[in-house]
């Protein structure tokens, strides 16, 4: 618990991120996801990072990028899409990722929606995220492609989120890398 109180959080846009810190984010995420995270970081356009430090050591992280989610054929919702949620292995189970996610939600309150693809639904459900129950699609130009049945997306309602039917169809624009 002591360490929880020492966690220092900082929100910073990718274009302000010093190279050394960027490399440390890549290192942290590469270890956590057990794959080279550099191509993912490189592909995220206009990312905003939430960094968690113990002393001067980056130990936990998440980022968001702007995406345009659409419910059925409604208007496009400006969505903060979360990626790269990771805590250094030896420092897990201390509430660090939770602290980062709470800070992130405060940082995106001007968006119309927040969303992510969860590693574990119950983890994010405890933090107030809701599983999307309807079918998922990726919009690619004129084409709309069905996402695999095992794909899961969770959303977080923000002050500007319109009324949502979680059983409706949900789509996102195509992007390089992971569709969701
Ligand atoms: C998921 C992760 C970020 C959690 O970091 P953390 O700082 O330990 O998170 P917190 O301390 O806030 O929460 C820990 C809780 O998550 C739970 N948890 C961790 N990994 C889990 C998993 N794979 N499945 C289910 N629950 C899990 C723990 O049991 C713990 O619950 P408890 O508080 O009841 O003991 C960290 O385990 C990690 O970096 N994992 C690898 C990368 C990853 O999968 N990221 C998520 C991408 S969506």
Image: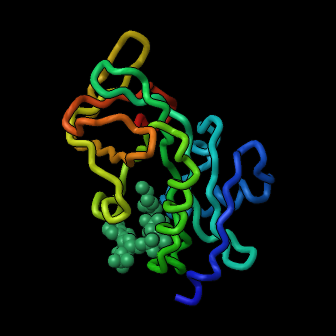
Q: Quadrant of residue 39?
A: top right
Q: Residue at x 67, y 77 (%)?
A: 54
Snapshot quadrant of residue 170: top left
* Left or right of residue 113: residue 135: left
Q: Residue furthest bottom?
A: 2
Quadrant for residue 42, please give it: top right
Q: How is the image coloured?
A: rainbow
Q: Where in the figure is residue 144, as x and y percent of width and height?
A: 32, 18
Q: In which of the image's four quarters is ligand 1 placed?
A: bottom left
Residue 97 rendering spot, x and y as whole percentages: 50, 67
- Residue, x 31% and y 18% (percent of image)? 73
Q: Is residue 162 above or below residue 116?
A: above
State the quadrant of the C terminus.
top left
The image position of residue 150, as x and y in percent, is 23, 44
Judged left or right of residue 141, residue 56 is right
Q: How many marks?
A: 0
- At 37% from the left edge and 26% from the top edge, which residue is drawn? 70
Q: Vertically, is 82 above or below 9?
A: above
Compared across the picture, whether 5 is left or right of 157 comes to: right
Q: Is residue 169 above or below residue 119?
A: above
Residue extending furthest toward the front: 159
Q: At 53% across and 80% down in the image, what residue appears? A: 90
Give the image location of residue 71, x and y in percent. 31, 28
């Amino acid at each position: 618990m002591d360490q929880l109180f020492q966690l220092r959080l900082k929100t910073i846009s990718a274009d302000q991120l010093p190279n050394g810190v960027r490399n440390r984010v890549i290192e942290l995420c590469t270890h956590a996801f057990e794959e080279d995270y550099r191509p993912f970081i490189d592909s995220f356009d206009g990312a905003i990072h939430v960094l968690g430090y113990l002393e001067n050591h980056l130990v936990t992280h998440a980022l968001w990028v702007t995406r345009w989610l659409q419910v059925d054929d409604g208007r496009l919702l400006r969505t903060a899409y979360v990626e790269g949620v990771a805590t250094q292995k030896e420092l897990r189970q201390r509430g660090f990722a939770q602290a980062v996610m709470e800070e992130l939600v405060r940082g995106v309150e001007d968006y119309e929606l927040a969303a992510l693809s969860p590693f574990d639904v119950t983890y994010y459900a405890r933090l107030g995220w809701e599983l999307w129950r309807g079918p998922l699609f990726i919009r690619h130009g004129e084409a709309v492609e069905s996402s695999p049945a095992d794909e899961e997306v969770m959303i977080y309602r923000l002050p500007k989120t319109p009324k949502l039917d979680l059983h409706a169809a949900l789509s996102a624009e195509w992007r390089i890398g992971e569709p969701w």
